[in-house]
């Protein structure tokens, strides 16, 4: 089966993982299985991949995309924040590398009934995990104006957050993606150009529905906790808010002292437990961006576990 989602920075991800014979790797955001398939195709060494995913439609697609590799792949329908406890169920407590490919997939964005896109009419949903109770309808219709404004500003970096929130509250109930997009376009006063005026607000609402920033922070910690010395953490993010979290996490974990710089003598006793592998963030090359415009905003960071004791 040809996946709808083209995996991003695949060569770079494979190099970053530093694959080894009999290695076990985790794809924390399996999606349609694009990265997992490329990782498995890249080597003749016996390796295996455990894929985590919360979206049951994505899991169905991934199972088809990965059917030729069924002896090397285990799909786990669970959040990456539960990696340690889920791998214990598989009889493991360490793996050799963990990949995160954050954000949403083309499959999700292109689904006309999931509510991720303002380009198709759909109920306001936006849940990655369809079993989750909270959805975009609740966030849009039940949040206060202040909560909406803070959310659009912090998660969408939307400069017109206040104006848009006021209009959303006045126009409620808002039931569909097109209704919401119309309110945002009218209140922002921006024309529909290359970047749709609702892009930032939709991103913010999606991130809130799925508690994405908290999950990333928790997920990174969980992933690092199951890496042995030399194990690799590989993270692709798609916007500055996500990338800042990843950068800060790796930078702090790679530093021996995290005391305030005004303090002369260290009081934190923090010991570095990661080593940053790429000092400069890795970005897609122009030919990848040409073939897959969605890759344009991708940023890859790689770190290696230093010691098993310090995390
Ligand atoms: C950018 S896509 C991954 C695409 C994948 N690398 C591929 O090549 O097909 C991100 C995926 O992460 C999933 N996801 C989001 N939050 C998750 C979580 N907490 N645990 C597991 N998967 C999650 C989403 O449902 C989505 O399918």
Image (tube, rainbow, N blue to C red):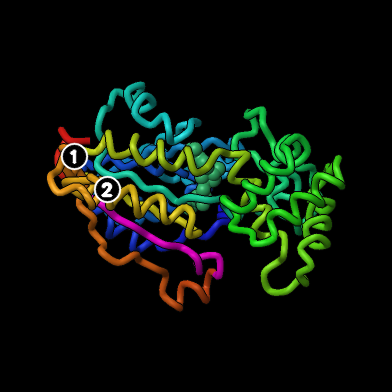
Q: Which residue is mark 1?
A: 270
Kindly state the secondary structure of the residue where label 2 is placed. helix
Front residue (pair 258, 209) = 258
Instruction: Let me know if residue 229 appears in the view.
Output: no
Give the numbered dot on residue 168: none
Please state the horizontal and vertical placement of residue 148, each as a whole percent of the image.
69, 45
Question: Along the horizontal axis of the image, is 279 left or right of 194?
Answer: left
Q: Give the quarter of the figure containing the C terminus.
A: top left
Mark 1: C-beta under 8 Å from nearest atom of ligand 1 = no
Question: Along the horizontal axis of the image, is 30 left or right of 41?
Answer: right
Q: Are marks 2 and 1 in contact (CB under 8 Å)?
A: yes
Question: Along the horizontal axis of the image, is 128 left or right of 49?
Answer: right
Please state the horizontal and vertical placement of residue 205, each as a whole percent of the image.
65, 46
Crowdedness near tag 2: few (<14), some (14–19) or many (≥20) residues, C-alpha within 10 Å: some
Q: Is residue 235 above or below residue 309?
A: below
How many dots with numbers?
2
Choose the circle earlier in sequence order: 2 or 1. Answer: 2
Kindly state the secondary structure of the residue where label 1 is placed. loop
Front residue (pair 185, 120) = 185
- Residue at x 82% of width, y 54% of height: 178
The stretch in magenta equals 293-304
Determine if the magenta segment contains residue 52.
Answer: no
Front residue (pair 22, 101) = 101
Front residue (pair 22, 91) = 91
C-alpha separation, residue under disc 2 versus residue under disc 1: 9 Å
Instruction: Let me know if residue 128 appears in the view.
Output: yes
Q: Which residue is mark 2?
A: 252
- Residue at x 41% of width, y 62% of height: 299
- Residue at x 47% of width, y 38% of height: 215
- Residue at x 75% of width, y 45% of height: 113
The image quarter containing residue 301 is bottom left
Question: Along the horizontal axis of the image, is 262 left or right of 117?
Answer: left
């Amino acid at each position: 089966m040809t996946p709808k989602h083209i995996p991003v920075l695949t060569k770079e991800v494979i190099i970053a993982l530093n694959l080894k014979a009999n290695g076990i790797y985790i794809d924390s955001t399996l999606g349609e299985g694009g990265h997992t398939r490329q990782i498995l195709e890249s080597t003749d060494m016996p390796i295996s991949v455990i894929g985590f995913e919360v979206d049951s439609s994505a899991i169905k697609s991934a199972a088809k995309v990965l059917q030729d590799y069924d002896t090397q792949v285990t799909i786990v329908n669970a959040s990456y924040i539960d990696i340690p406890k889920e791998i214990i169920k598989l009889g493991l407590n360490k793996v050799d590398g963990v990949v995160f490919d954050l954000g949403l997939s083309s499959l999700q964005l292109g689904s006309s009934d999931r509510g991720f896109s303002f380009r198709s009419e759909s109920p306001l949903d936006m849940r990655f995990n369809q079993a989750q109770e909270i959805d975009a309808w609740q966030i849009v219709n039940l949040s206060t104006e202040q909560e909406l404004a803070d959310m659009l500003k912090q998660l969408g970096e939307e400069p017109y957050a206040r104006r848009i929130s006021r209009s959303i509250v006045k126009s409620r109930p808002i039931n569909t993606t097109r209704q919401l997009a119309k309110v945002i376009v009218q209140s922002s006063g921006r024309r529909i150009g290359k970047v749709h005026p609702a892009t930032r607000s939709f991103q913010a609402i999606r991130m809130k529905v799925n508690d994405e920033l908290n999950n990333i922070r928790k997920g990174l910690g969980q992933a690092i906790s199951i890496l042995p010395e030399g194990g690799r953490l590989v993270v692709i993010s798609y916007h500055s808010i996500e990338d800042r979290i990843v950068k800060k996490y790796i930078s702090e974990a790679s530093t021996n002292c995290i005391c305030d710089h005004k303090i002369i003598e260290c009081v934190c006793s923090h010991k570095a437990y990661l080593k940053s592998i790429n000092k400069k963030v890795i970005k897609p090359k122009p030919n990848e961006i040409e073939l897959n415009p969605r890759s344009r905003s991708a940023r890859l960071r790689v770190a290696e576990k230093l010691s098993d004791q310090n995390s």
